[in-house]
Amino acid sequence: MTHPSLYLHKTDALRKLQNLVARGHARWTGGWIEPKKVQALCLKFADRYGIERSAQQRWRAKAQGEASAHLILWPGEPQQVHWWLVVSPGGGLVVELEQLQDAGRQRIEVTGYELVQMPRQGRAAAWTWRMTAANYQAWEERLKTVIRHHDEPGIQQSLHSLRRTPPFAESRRQAFELGRLAQAEWQRSRRGPCPYDGLFVGWFGRFQAAKTLPVPARGRRKKGA
């Protein structure tokens, strides 16, 4: 039996979504709820859709043509928990009761990032996260503005934030592009070499474990809850 977990960090939640969609759970729905309602949501989805099933139970259900569902939770803002229900091919209650979207057509978006399938030379396309067009454009304007206005604290803060870009293949590439844009803008507007070191955005550690808080999917509700 596997209970849903509350991911403490956005990047871990994004990685889990990426992995599940890549493994075939490409139908989804989602939203956000108050923290006090998380357990009730888990209880409902466990009873209806079997989100706490073991791997063996999921395999048996798949053999019978039933979809498998996983719930991902992330406390993105104070008093707000984001949730995503991702579903594999097949039928069942989750297909009948939820308005599921195809991740390839209706992309999953989280705080300015979107989950997309990108082509790779000589290999099959892969799922990855990238900045949305609006987010990327906002970064371009932000970097140009702070550099042109000689805003030293703004430049430092912008580069610090850019280094914290979620380290997925496509978002890393975009971060490096923005880093090069910042250097080019400095050289153009300040008439000299950029004094800041090249941008570095790390990769995930191969066996890096996500930090989570367990959310019980079963059990009695407290009176008055």
Image (cartoon, grey):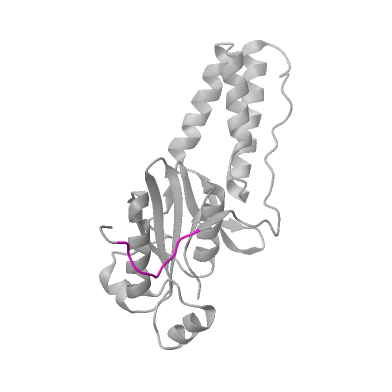
The answer to whether 198 appears left or right of 217 in the picture is right
Q: Where is residue 166 shown, x and y percent of the image?
A: 58, 44
The answer to whether 65 appears left or right of 96 in the picture is right
Looking at the image, residue 128 lies above or below residue 161: below
The stretch of residues the image draws in magenta is 214-222
Identify which residue is drawn at 49% across, 70% down: 24
Taken as a whole, is the magenta stretch helix, strand or loop? loop
Looking at the image, residue 7 lies above or below residue 4: above
Residue 70 highlighted magenta (yes or no): no
The image quadrant that residue 28 belongs to is bottom left
Q: Nearer the viewer, residue 21 or 8?
A: 8
Which quarter of the rendering shows the C terminus?
bottom left
Q: Where is residue 133 shown, x and y percent of the image?
A: 46, 39
How many numbered callouts?
0
Q: Where is residue 44 shown, x and y percent of the image?
A: 32, 68
Q: Where is residue 199 shown, x and y percent of the image?
A: 69, 33
Identify which residue is drawn at 33% across, 51% down: 33
